[in-house]
Amino acid sequence: MKSRSPLVNRIAIVVCAVVLTSIVSMTTTLTVSKSIEGNATAINLAGALRMGAFRLLSHVASPEGSKAGESSIQDLASQYELSLEDDKLTRAIPATEDHQLAKQYQSISMYWKQSLRPRLESHPQGAPISAEMLAVTENYVESVNQMVSMLERRTEARIGLLHLIQIISLAFSILIIIALFVDLRNRVLKPLRKLVSIAIAVGEQDFSRKANLQGSDELAQLGSAFDQMSSELALTYYDLEERARSKTEELEKSHAALQLLHTASRNLFSNHDLCSGAVPMLQELEQLLGIGPILLYLHDKESTEPVQAVTTASAERPFYCRDHHCNACLVTSEVYDERPIEEHDGRRLLLPIRTPSGLLGTLEVWYPADKGLSDTARRLLETLSDQLATAIFLERQITEQQQLTLAEERTVIARELHDSLAQSLSYLKMQVARMRRLNIEGDQKIPHDAILEELSTGLNSAYRQLRELLATFRLKLDTPDLATALRKTIEEFSERLGKSVGLKYNLPPQALSPNEEIHTLQIVREGLANAVKHADATEIFVEILFESPQVKAKIRDNGRGLPQDGQPVNHYGLIIMQDRARTLGGQVAVQNHEKGGVEVILTFVPKSRHLIPTETSST
């Protein structure tokens, strides 16, 4: 059965009328434009015939026309006749012989062949043009002018016809469009406005408005569908509202859990105690999600079984508990028995606590079997396991780093004691053994006073080295880097000198290892001590420079300088400085400065030079 669609039929009629008008307009326009195709070229060729006639007349009158190499009048006349019979010109001439334009063209052609051409060919070359000859040419040119005018008028008439067809087509199109607009306003726009107002009312939760459209067209059917839809929406709205309310409650619960995880992440990273940082957060998460208890097991490479580290509910204090004043995980036996564990219809979820480097532990989550565990709660617990993995990994890293730092500091202290105080004590031991041997052998060649003087000097040196070591270690433990320790050292020796000691420092941060910092600081202190005690200096200047890839330390004073034969006898400080420089893989140069005083220069390449940025080489 064929269904009727009045609205579609009306639109189809209007579209067909517009299409038909357009086809008629385009067809007639194409026909007219086709008929005048080539007229402009024909007019140009016809106009060129006039100039060509006078050119031929000028050629026969010119005495130079008979020279060698010039075309004869017969050749030029033949070329001209080809232009007269050109297809581009003849196509613009109507095919009917009784047409005025066709008659005019035949008249021009006959006049050329019978009158003008014979006269031009028979005229003596170079002879003056007679009046008769000139009159014949002018008559021919006048005929050509008439043909050109006829071509122009014919072309203009066709163009006028083309304009008239376009105006008529435009008028028909405007009338059709006006009729279409009137029909659309009455039968489409008004019903659509009513339907839109109903849709807006439905969007504002008002289901009481009805369209009540009369008729059998599509919009009337759509209005009936709108009325039925609003009735059904009124019935289902309350059901959807109830679902949205329950979803909102779930989202609020998830939001609260996310806030809890955010707060927990800060507590986990700020509090290094995993138990006190995790248990309150896990208990709040249990209350939000309706789960629990939650247990955390850590994997230890020294143990084959996982070690329980955290629990949120325990009837007795766990064996691993270190704070017996904390009762965060302790609950009564009644509360513990109500938790959903295996004996009380509970299910268990195991989540790995993992980092890219390996498995750190397992998170065990118990939840009621009758309620199950939602996808949202599962994702939150997975996020929690990731946070716990990061916190546990960082805590282990910090512990390992502290152990490495402590071991390195102990190694530095042991090396310092071995390289300084131990050597001095060994020297004193040898001197004591020497004195005993002298007493036993009774050898009085070497006086005891000399040995006692050496013992006194060694004791003083050992005591001074011990004080230097104590001062150095206190500086190192109280200050974060070499620069701060150097500034404190400069302040100390400025007080001893009674005048400010200059300092220039441009080492990059973390350029030296702790061992290299200790040796560099000791060498600088030794150089400053020598300048203050032995050089009688009034000005001292210290430079610590980085000249890639070397580190250079200079201590320069304006004192009395070194003696002519080099360093003083039994001056153990310079020997110790050279030993320290060799330990650093560098060297120490002690020399008189050209402007007076002594200059101590330490140069070495740091073992951590690959960490030093090369652009930090400006002095």
Image (cartoon, rainbow, N blue to C red):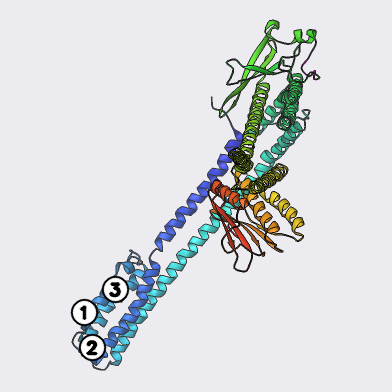
Q: Position of residue 416 (x, y in %)?
A: 62, 42
**3D distance between C-alphas at marks 3 and 1:** 13 Å
**3D distance between C-alphas at marks 2 and 1:** 12 Å
Q: Please, is residue 165 above or below residue 296 in the view?
A: below
Q: Amino acid at mark 1?
A: Asp
**Local secondary structure at mark 2:** helix
- In this rendering, position of residue 397 left or right of residue 135: right
Dot label at residue 75? 1
Q: Residue at x 57, y 60 (%)?
A: 566
**Mark 3 lies on residue:** 83
Q: Are marks 2 and 1 in contact (CB under 8 Å)?
A: no
Q: Are marks 2 and 3 in contact (CB under 8 Å)?
A: no
The magenta segment:
326-331
Q: Please, is residue 127 above or below residue 322 in the view?
A: below
**Mark 2 lies on residue:** 65
Q: Position of residue 234 (x, y in %)?
A: 75, 24
Q: Quadrant of residue 65?
A: bottom left
- Characterize the local packing of mark 2: few (<14), some (14-19) or many (20 or more) Cα atoms within 10 angstroms: some
Residue 517: within the magenta?
Answer: no
Q: Amino acid at mark 2?
A: Gly
| Whether residue 479 is visible | no
| Whether residue 159 is visible | yes
Q: Residue at x 28, y 92 (%)?
A: 130
**3D distance between C-alphas at marks 2 and 3:** 21 Å
Our reading of the magenta stretch's main secondary structure is: loop
Q: Nearer the viewer, mark 2 or mark 3?
A: 2
Q: Amino acid at mark 3?
A: Ser
Q: Quadrant of residue 12?
A: top right
